[in-house]
Image (cartoon, rainbow, N blue to C red):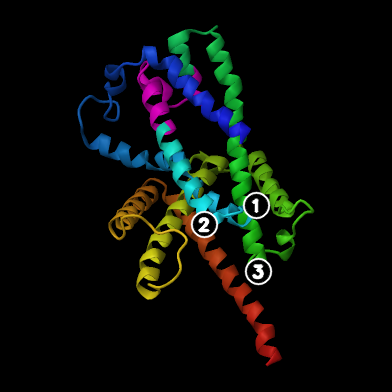
Amino acid sequence: LIVTLLAVIELLVFMGVVAPGFSVARFAANGWAGNDAFGPAAISGIFAAIPFAIWFFLAIEGAAMAAEEAKNPKRTIPRAYIAGILTLVVLALGVMVFAGGVGDWRQLSNINDPLPQAMKAVVGNSSTWLHMLVWIGLFGLVASFHGIILGYSRQFFALARAGFLPHGLAKLSRFRTPHRAILAGGVIGIAAICSDSVVKIQGMSLTAAMITMSVFGAIVMYVMSMLSLFKLRRSEPGLERSFRAPGYPLVPAIALLLAVVCLVAMVWFNPIVALIFVGLLLFGALCCVLSLRSQASPVAGSR
């Protein structure tokens, strides 16, 4: 919690420091794919930017993974979702607008440290604010790691408990945390980092391709979630629901439509990664089917 609060404070400080140098004219200049007028290149740029827009909010659904560890999940999980999404919307819009309006945003589009460079244009190279941003920025990285660890470990734990992964990953430590699942995901992450400069997919590094695949997975999950919502509302109208989607059926329908558009855009701009994702998806489905059959066989044999 402390690390996350420091990361939020860092972004608020960034917006406050660069605000005096912000200009709407600079933010809007060359705003259509590098041009001042709307054209075909702008449409292509909009769709190409969809994965990065999704990345702002990716893994927010991981909050549900902590439901078993919450004292009152029916009350706290929906609150966590709403508060998290609102926080991300405010911070994402603020960072994008202020960073893009203090200079030529095209100079920030292909670098790994856009925020320090944007602040440097306002306060200079030797400012204390700049050094503070760089150091506190590490807390944002740590906060991201914590969120990722929380999400993947609980996912591994749930799949192992259901029999889709080795049962050993469902073991809990004396502190009631899935320590084996945490370590297993860490090993996979370290292997990916070590292979980053060796493996190239569609001109991207391995980690960049994995990020794109994670966006694919998120979009497919969003589509399936919306379809499941419509199906359950029709087939199980009396089912007890701890949280009801607001604005049904209009809001879920809009969410489904946007998810499909994002999925099509992702496939169009990342065809090779999409094929790899489909292959992994089919492999995972096959493993699930085989696992279910192996679990059902002893029951059938005992009869």
Residue 13 lies, with reference to residue 173, above or below; the image says above
Which residue is painted at 61% across and 29% down in the image? 139
Any mark on residue 153, and which? 1
* Image quadrant containing the N terminus: top right
Q: Nearer the viewer, mark 2 or mark 3?
A: 2
For numbered disc 3, what is the local secondary structure?
loop
Q: Does residue 284 show up?
A: yes
**Amino acid on which disc 3 is placed:** Gly
Which residue is painted at 49% across and 25% down in the image? 11
Q: Is residue 6 magenta?
A: no
Circle 1 Cα neighbour tier, 10 Å, few/some/many (<14 / 14–19 / ≥20) = many
The magenta span reads: 91-116
Q: Is residue 95 magenta?
A: yes
User: Residue 290's x, y, as percent?
Assistant: 61, 74
For numbered disc 2, what is the local secondary structure?
helix
Residue 200 lies, with reference to residue 118, above or below; the image says below
Cβ–Cβ under 8 Å for marks 1 and 2:
no
**Marks 1 and 2, the one that precedes in the sequence:** 2
Per the image, the residue denoted by label 3 is: 163
Which of the two residues, 243 or 264, is positioned nearer the viewer here? 243
Find the distance from the CA under tag 1 to the CA under tag 2: 22 Å
Any mark on residue 74, and which? 2
Q: Does residue 196 show up?
A: no
**Marks 1 and 3, the one that precedes in the sequence:** 1
**Amino acid on which disc 2 is placed:** Lys
Which residue is painted at 26% across and 35% down in the image? 41
Which residue is painted at 33% across and 57% down in the image? 252
* Image quadrant containing the C terminus: bottom right
